[in-house]
């Protein structure tokens, strides 16, 4: 199948992938009097007295804003807000398809952090949650942090937090297959953008300490020659405990796990052969992974995962974000916190009995969204962030 041509034809024929449809069949003046004036005044008056009632009388409780500035669209880079719209529409489509959540695409015509934050704050009364998408690092972290401080609805950055949840779930099951202590695995994360930083943060929260962050120039450590942004500098202090130095080839020597969120063909057979026995390779760059799975297996990799759907062991954040938001919205959570993400990862890992070629459920497994929603909702109650 020529996916490129068929995708263009589909988008042009339908003029996008989403639409807005009414819940009520309007047939006469009596119906009109209920859905609009004069009847609509009644919920307005109640909400004016208690704004929390918007969750009961409007779509707010099941409505997300999917927000981008178009600066990091897929692996294509800074394409701008208009070019980001097909992706953001697609995300809204997936929220509806996999979790029955209504979502609106908001592609903003600014890349200024404070302007983005203020815009979202002004729009927030309409929505039950905010999903940030395709915003370049490190700006995405500043936006996420500021919004979490100023808003009392869940704010989630899928490229960062959603990816981290599915990677942790896959690692939990890979360690189970290998009968290894997850916390003792030595892990090299190649690529220190939004996904790499998000993965490292969640793995640390899960108790993993032997983490090494790596860029094209080599391993990161305090005092390293690479120019680091604020987020990378902060992470460097709590990773690479043995202060390993050198390029990826040297850093991977004796490592148990390679997690690639970087670019194509940065990993080769020689590097894998230098790793510990039965290495785990997650080559997640899309559409071209850091190494082709068949090459990794030929070099001695024990388990290989990619972000692609045409290979076994797809590690895809579509397994995470619908269920996470379904659970957060169901209990009107004020935030999505670390405990909720950890419990989502653990729940995702437990859905199937894992194997070398099936670490995680398929994205069309109907259990996924419900199981994650229940785990996230329970964690929200436990952490005291439920309305």
Image (spheres, rainbow, N blue to C red):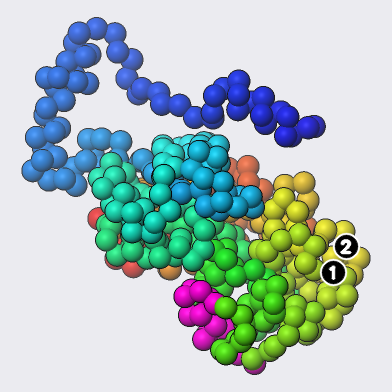
Residue at x 72% of width, y 47% of height: 309
Residue at x 57% of width, y 22% of height: 14
Mark 2 and mark 1: span between their CA atoms? 8 Å
Q: How many residues crowd around disc 1 within 10 Å: few (fewer than 14), some, or many (20 or more)?
A: some
| Left or right side of 267 for 172 | left
In terms of image quadrants, where is residue 246?
Answer: bottom right
Which residue is most to the top? Answer: 28
Above or below — where is 349 with respect to 367?
Answer: below
User: How many tags in the picture?
Assistant: 2
Residue at x 60% of width, y 20% of height: 13
Q: Is residue 320 visible?
A: no
Looking at the rendering, the stretch of residues picked out in magenta corresponds to 228-242
Which residue is most to the bottom? Answer: 242
Residue 160 horizontal/vertical position (percent): 52, 61
Above or below — where is 180 with respect to 114?
Answer: below
What quarter of the picture does the N terminus occupy? Answer: top right
Residue 114 horizontal/vertical position (percent): 33, 59
Q: Are marks 2 and 1 in contact (CB under 8 Å)?
A: yes
Reading the image, the residue beneath label 1 is 268
Reading the image, the residue beneath label 2 is 295
Q: Let me know if residue 189 is in the magenta part.
A: no
In terms of image quadrants, where is residue 212?
Answer: bottom right
Q: How many residues crowd around disc 2 within 10 Å: few (fewer than 14), some, or many (20 or more)?
A: some
Residue 259 horizontal/vertical position (percent): 69, 69
Residue 190 horizontal/vertical position (percent): 68, 71
- Front in this rendered view, residue 147 or 167: 147
Which is nearer the N-term, disc 2 or disc 1?
1
């Amino acid at each position: 199948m020529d996916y490129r041509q068929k995708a263009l034809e589909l988008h042009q024929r339908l003029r996008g992938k989403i639409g807005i449809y009414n819940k009520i069949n309007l047939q006469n003046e009596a119906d009109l009097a209920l859905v609009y004036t004069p009847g609509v005044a009644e919920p307005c008056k109640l909400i004016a007295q208690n704004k929390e009632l918007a969750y009961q009388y409007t779509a707010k409780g099941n409505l997300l804003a999917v927000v981008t500035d178009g600066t990091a669209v897929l692996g294509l880079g800074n394409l701008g807000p208009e070019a980001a719209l097909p992706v953001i529409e697609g995300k809204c489509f997936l929220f509806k398809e996999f979790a029955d959540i209504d979502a609106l695409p908001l592609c903003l015509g600014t890349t200024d952090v404070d302007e983005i934050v203020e815009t979202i704050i002004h729009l927030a009364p309409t929505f039950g949650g905010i999903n940030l998408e395709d915003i370049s690092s490190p700006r995405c972290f500043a936006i996420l942090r500021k919004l979490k401080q100023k808003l009392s609805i869940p704010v989630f950055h899928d490229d960062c937090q959603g990816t981290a949840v599915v990677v942790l779930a896959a690692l939990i099951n890979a360690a189970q297959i290998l009968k290894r202590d997850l916390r003792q695995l030595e892990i090299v994360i190649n690529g220190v953008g939004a996904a790499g930083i998000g993965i490292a943060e969640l793995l640390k929260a899960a108790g993993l300490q032997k983490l090494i962050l790596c860029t094209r120039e080599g391993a990161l450590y305090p005092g390293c020659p690479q120019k680091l942004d604020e987020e990378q500098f902060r992470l460097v202090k709590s990773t690479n405990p043995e202060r390993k130095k050198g390029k990826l080839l040297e850093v991977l020597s004796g490592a148990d796990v390679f997690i690639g969120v970087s670019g194509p063909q940065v990993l080769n057979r020689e590097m894998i052969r230098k790793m510990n026995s039965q290495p785990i390779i997650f080559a997640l760059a899309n559409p071209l992974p850091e190494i082709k799975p068949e090459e990794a297996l030929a070099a001695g990799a024990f388990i290989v995962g990619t972000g692609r759907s045409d290979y076994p062991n797809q590690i895809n954040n579509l397994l995470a974000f619908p269920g996470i938001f379904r659970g957060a919205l169901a209990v009107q959570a004020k935030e999505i916190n670390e405990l909720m993400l950890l419990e989502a990862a653990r729940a995702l890992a437990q859905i199937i009995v894992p194997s070398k070629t099936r670490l995680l459920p398929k994205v069309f497994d109907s259990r996924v969204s419900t199981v994650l929603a229940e785990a996230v909702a329970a964690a929200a109650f436990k952490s005291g962030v439920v309305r």
